[in-house]
Amino acid sequence: MIRAALPTAALLLGLAGCAASPPLARGLPAERPRALELYATPFFPQEDYQCGPAALATVLQVSGVAVEPAELVPQVYLPGRRGSLQAELIGATRRHGRLAYRLPGTGQALLAELEAGRPVLLLQNLGSRALPTFHYAVLIGYDANRNIALLRSGRSERLAVRWQSFARSWDRAGRWAIAVLEPGVIPAEAQVADYLEAAAGLEAAGHERAAGIAYDAALARWPQQPLAWLARGNAAYLAGELAAAADAYARAVALAPGDAVARNNLAQVLIDAGCTDAARRQLSRAEARVAGPEIAARIAATRAQLPAETSTNALSCRLGERDWPD
Amino acid sequence: MHINRFRRSCVMLVSASLVSLGLQAPAVAGIVGTAEAVAAAREQGDRAAVAAAMARDDVRAQLLALGVDPAAADGRLAALTAPELATLAGQLEQAPAGGDSALAIVGLVFLVLLLLEYTGTIDIFKKVP
């Protein structure tokens, strides 16, 4: 349901599959520059099979991380596959304190990143669908007048490719592209769930402070999104700040009373703070609205921590007298 | 080494009994994490529900089998979220691995052209009989 707001087909810039994809100029919105090139993007000529480390070092350096491809090899290269997996490029990005934001599969999204001054790390399939040859490259610009895409690719510092060939090679690789972002920077057309997922990845990789900056930026950008408040609450909870976590979860529940996950997490904080009556009420609400066995199991596990009978616990509740959302 | 092997067989035994009894692994009490909440919001929750520890062991074994240094494997695993590990488990042989050698492509294109030339489909190498 969150995905429903994905950019429309009108923004595909003619990347719609194998059918003859149109030249760049035809789909280029009037407000975009006709041509753009991020000249300052560094270049690392790749060693054999090592386009992953080379391309990743390129975008990490632009984001302010001083890292060389050789340092990334033990973090992403899979000798047995003679290449690097997408998931591991994302993991290595996090290890350097940067968010890996998966861009929507539209040409428009790529061009928007370039206009924001960020080169784009992407996967191409230079072979065919049946006999794929996957290759990571960095898109650094385009020229609608000459109908080309400009890439740092392999051993080419400035590879100019006909736009349609580039678009097809990207399409054959599943239109995978990521923006490597400093925490706090949000792409212009970002989706809240995609951004929070990227920030949560950073948190899971042990960069809690960087993730916290990203969550704050998400709240500033999407103050009405319950998921953003949930993420803020989770970060506070993991940092041991029960009151801040409870407040953030309460905001999430107030914005989305049907959100069983937010109610479960609020209940957990209330249990930790000794507010068992309030927790019991949140869990009953959550149980009435749960979707899916996984979340149901989590709610049941939370409930299992409650003492059997209702107790009057106004004195033991460490979060004080408050009206939690009903 | 022996302890590892013992732990491994214990894990296998417990996993096998859980599967054969049709029991779900007990859910962890506590908050639902952000990555998990996003996955649930996208209705992939059950995929992420594959016990994270099993997925981690699986991916670790595959990384080692594909030549990753054991000392480096743990850092690589720690950078992935539970839903990502669940998606990756069992897929390391098939997932796209970007890493072509530029020479390999040039060579492949050349071979195809040569083949087409010999079969008479194209005629670009004028000197080739």
Image: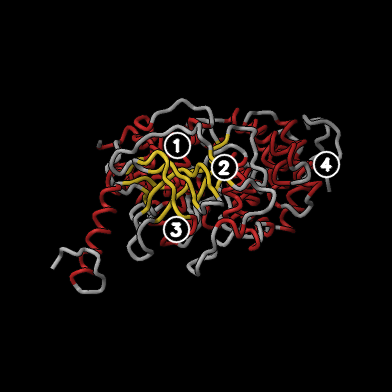
The residue singled out by tag 1 in the image is A92
Q: Distance from label 2 to label 3 (Cα)? A: 19 Å
Question: What residue is drawn where x is 59% and y is 37%?
Answer: A117
Q: Earlier in the sequence, mark 4 or mark 2?
A: 2
Task: State the separation of the CA atoms marked 4 and 1.
Answer: 40 Å
Question: What number is the disc on residue A165?
Answer: 3
Amino acid type at image mark 3: Ser
What residue appears at the point 54 percent right and 63 percent down from the top-left corner? A22
Are the residues tagged 2 and 3 within 8 Å (C-beta)?
A: no
The residue type indicated by label 4 comes to Trp
- Image check: A30 left or right of A142? right
Residue A98, x across and y down, in percent: 54, 33
Of the residues tagged 4 and 2, which is closer to the observer? 2
- The answer to which image quadrant residue A183 occupies is top right
Mark 1 lies on a secondary structure that is helix
Determine the residue located farthest toward the bottom in the rendered image: B120
Q: Measure how far apart labels 2 and 1 are at the Cα level.
A: 28 Å
Q: Which residue is mark 2?
A: A36
Q: CA distance from mark 4 to mark 3?
A: 57 Å
Q: Is residue A21 above or below residue B6?
A: below
Residue A44 in view: yes
* N-term mark: 2 or 1: 2
Colouring style: secondary structure
* Tag 2: amino acid: Leu
User: For the residues carrying marks 3 and 1, which lies nearer the camera in this image?
Assistant: 3
